[in-house]
Image (tube, rainbow, N blue to C red):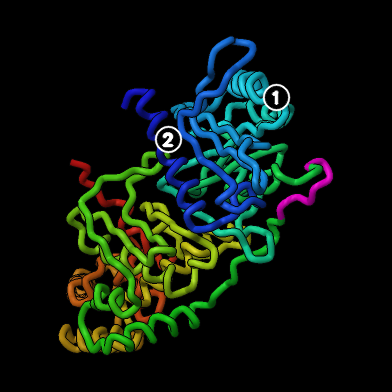
Amino acid sequence: MHSTAKGNSLEDALVEYLTEQQERGDLVNGAHPPSLCKIRKKAKYPCPDRKKPVEFDVVIEVCRESRKSPYLYVVFECKNYKSGVPEERVRVFSDQIRSVFGHSVKGILVVSSRLQSGAEMIARSRSMGILKFSDTGADIVLDRRGGTDVESAFLRSQILADQQHIRSLKFSACFDGIFFCNIDQMLEYFNRPSMAGATRPSSGSSTPHMSLDDIRAFATDIVEGIEYRDGPVDLEKICDLMELKLKLSKKVVFDEDGKFLLGSANFERNEIEVNLHQNKFRERFTIAHEIGHFCLGHGSYLRSETVVEQDLLMDREKPDTFNLTRLEVQANLFAAELLFPNKIFQIAVSVACDRHDMIDIGFGRIYVDDNDWNYKRYNLMISELSEYFLASKKATEIRLQRLGLVNDQRRFGKSSGAVSLGEVFSRIDIDTH
């Protein structure tokens, strides 16, 4: 795409994002009713230094009650760089807006890539904001207590080029050394009378840990709600029961890091969208994953979120697990419980064992080693269960291991119980044609 077209695309996405906030009735600039704010695209303003108008990409004009002239301008300049944002770009933009608006302005450079070394320091010294925006990332909701459920270390990874990428957010920003996950939060900080003495946004709140037993209970309630009896769980029926709109598309969409988007969820519209690419197992896991987000109440923390392959690899929490990552882990565990309902799965396993004459001779009923006879019976059983529940063989095998139903003594080609549930998808080539 031409660089100008890319820039325009970024502007369009930002304007749509701001307009949606305004239409929802959210406070714009963190303090002003939407009716007092005007969002302008490609707005021109006179510049005394240049003796001619200067055009800015996106501007929020904020007026006081019963006044027509804005008392504050929030100016966004959109740059869709492939590489990191250079510090010179921050400096030039700062000079431009000061020349046009004087001191009644807050400048924000909107980018689709991370900052080069030094750019953050220039932005901080010039009181400039850096906003990293992606319409394919997760959209965070402000915590009711005034904090966020995203840690500073996580947000730094979104902004700075030397930080390890973890998860794409729809919005991330930095100003004066402070990192934000929501545009309202940053603009509210701008609007405080004395930002130097203002309290920094809290990042100490945490999304709750949910045990596997609780997640299993949730999934069991859901499948019982559709009167599930056997076979593959009807995920579309679950969506109907929960009044979730399920959209199936053939779109090929990539996030800012070039990863294929498997699907997305919009919690405000109660909508799940899945991109179909001829892999029924991956598609079903994606749908079950998104249903998990809705069932587990993750709409309290997110307005929207997207799923890439990397997200499906998360099925274990570590001591340093980020809060947003915890939501993905919980959604994956829920998906497994939904695709393999515990009671019916155990019955199906017992029937499959009977069919293939698998009996307990002291090593457990399901025993597999490198012996050809044992492996063939085991593989046939896994294949049948996979087709019965419309889930991958790998996911089926991991389900058996997590429930402690298999004694795997293979020395070669052994499937470790530590393999993540979503790893079945990591070897699948995505058809992008």
Q: Residue 218: which numbered mark, if any? A: none
Does any portion of residue 193 appear in the rendered image? yes
In the picture as drawn, the residue positioned furthest to the front comes out as: 66
Does any portion of residue 361 appear in the rendered image? no
Q: Residue 10: which numbered mark, if any? A: 2
Above or below — where is 43 with respect to 134? above
Q: Residue 102: which numbered mark, if any? A: 1
Quadrant for the N terminus, please.
top left
Element carrying mark 1: loop
Quadrant of the rendered image containing residue 381? bottom left
Above or below — where is 298 with respect to 195? below
Within 10 Å of disc 1 (Cα), the crowding (few <14, some 14-19, many 20+) is few
Above or below — where is 227 with respect to 187? below
Quadrant for the C terminus, please.
top left
Q: Amino acid at mark 2?
A: Leu
Quadrant of the rendered image containing residue 361? bottom left
The residue lying at 59 percent from left, 47 percent from top is 36
Within 10 Å of disc 2 (Cα), the crowding (few <14, some 14-19, many 20+) is many
What segment carries the magenta color? 195-201
Is residue 51 toward the left or the right of residue 269 in the image? right
Quadrant of the rendered image containing residue 134? top left
Element carrying mark 2: helix
Q: Earlier in the sequence, mark 1 or mark 2?
A: 2
- Where is residue 92 drawn, in percent x and y? 61, 18
Distance from disc 1 to disc 2, alpha carbons, whole Å, reads 26 Å
The residue lying at 50 percent from left, 52 percent from top is 21
Above or below — where is 421 with respect to 253? below
The residue lying at 53 percent from left, 39 percent from top is 132
Q: Nearer the viewer, mark 1 or mark 2?
A: 1
Q: Amino acid at mark 1?
A: Gly
